[in-house]
Amino acid sequence: MMTTYAVNYKRKAIEKLDILSLDKLKVVLDFIEYLEQKENLDATLEIQADDNSMRNIRAADQAWEAGRVQEFTSWNKVKRHV
């Protein structure tokens, strides 16, 4: 859910986009894609820096490779509780 501030920023950004030339829109899109990639990388690095998260990921990988599927929750069950 977006906050009021986020909605206002998004609205203002869209208003600004409406007045830009095609060349400038291409630059904006490139920058937005860069920001998206950077955000994804930052999230990955944050997880990798967390020893507990990495321990859990390694344990899950080992359980999966060992065929211990009972340790996992099915996607259908997850969807019902979201």
Image (cartoon, grey):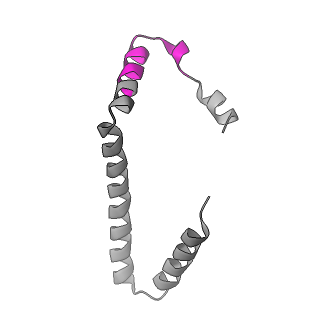
Q: Is residue 16 above or below residue 49?
A: below
Give me the residue at 52% from left, 16% from top. 71
Q: Is residue 76 left or right of residue 25?
A: right
Quadrant for the N terminus, please. bottom right
Give me the residue at 34% from left, 44% from top. 46
* Rendering coords of residue 5 (x, y %): 56, 71
Quadrant for the C terminus, please. top right
* Rendering coords of residue 15 (x, y %): 52, 84
Count of marks, rendered view? 0
- The magenta-colored residue range is 57-72
* Rendering coords of residue 30 (x, y %): 33, 69
Q: Is residue 41 above or below residue 13?
A: above
> What secondary structure is the stretch in magenta mostly built from?
helix
Q: Is residue 67 left or right of residue 5?
A: left
Q: Is residue 70 left or right of residue 27?
A: right
Q: Is residue 59 magenta?
A: yes
Q: Quadrant of residue 11?
A: bottom right
Give me the residue at 61% from left, 70% from top. 4
